[in-house]
Image (tube, grey):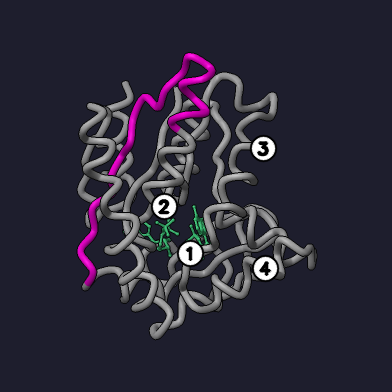
Amino acid sequence: MKIIMLGAPGAGKGTQAKMIADKYAVPHVSTGDIFRANIKEGTELGKEAKKYMDQGLLVPDELTVKILLDRVAKEDCANGYVLDGFPRTIPQAEVLDKALTELGDKIDYAINVDVPDENIVKRMGGRRACLACGATYHIEHIPPKTEGICDRCGKELILRDDDKPETVKNRLQVYHDQTQPLIDFYNAKGVLKEVDGTVDMKDVFEAIVAILG
Ligand code: ADP
Ligand code: AMP
């Protein structure tokens, strides 16, 4: 099962992708997590990506496409995966489509988690992330058991640099300009599914499970 999560930054793609990955036993592949891991390790890729991420801009397609194609070529992705944060542009989607077609394969579902912009800005300020294991929380909606500490791995939680309000506004603009057109792209391919992302995360997941079966 190959799934793409679509939606604005902060719509809940990562939250749902992790639940899908657990239930359907497929890897959760997040380009944002891959970039953040590289930033933490101080790699060249990390240094380059950080320049764009800190401004709320997209990392150029040339860099992003390569890391994604390398990742999905790994053994653990052979039976499927859930992509979170990729594709974010039409050219990225076209490259993925071509790579899959060459393997006689295709995306099964593109799930659009729909959340209006007004809700997004509030959510992002409350997001807390664990850079060690990738878990995300929300200080009001999905708090960790102990404030500031990851339930899963015990490491410290942080407010991402790019979740500050000024940057969130840029990210939303970038989303509308460059990523939202993917909704039509996948609709035309007959794989688009819409879910309401404003409800409780468990109810969002129920709607997704009803789609995936
Ligand atoms: P994305 O991966 O789309 O950027 P996240 O999954 O990281 O978004 O979610 C953004 C923030 O909103 C996080 O703090 C997360 O805990 C919270 N969140 C996710 N789903 C919901 C929901 N259904 N209701 C309220 N808050 C949510
Ligand atoms: P995310 O964790 O998905 O919210 O991504 C955080 C940031 O990483 C984005 O704002 C971009 O700067 C960068 N990024 C992640 N995925 C992509 C992608 N597919 N294309 C370009 N930039 C990306």
Q: What residue lies at 54% left-to-right and 29% top-to-bottom?
A: 26
Dot placed on the residue nearer the N-terminal end, 1 or 2: 1
How far apart, in angstroms, are the residues tagged by discs 4 and 2?
A: 18 Å
Q: Which residue is mark 4?
A: 48
| Sequence-first tag of 3 and 2 | 3
**Element at label 4:** helix
Q: Residues within 10 Å of mark 4 (few under 14, many from 20)?
A: some
Name the residue rendered at 52%, 34% in the picture: 22
Q: What's the residue at 25%, 69% (across, down)?
A: 119
Tell me if the residue at label 4 has its CB under 8 Å from ligand 2.
Answer: no
In the picture provided, is 61 more to the left or to the right than 167? Answer: right
Any atom of ligand 2 within 8 Å of the CB at mark 2?
yes
x and y, in percent, of residue 43 in the image: 79, 63
Q: Is residue 52 above or below residue 13?
A: below
For mark 3, what is the residue?
A: 70
Identify the magenta region.
Answer: 97-117
Q: Quadrant of residue 132?
A: bottom right
Q: Mark 3 near mark 1, Cβ–Cβ under 8 Å? A: no
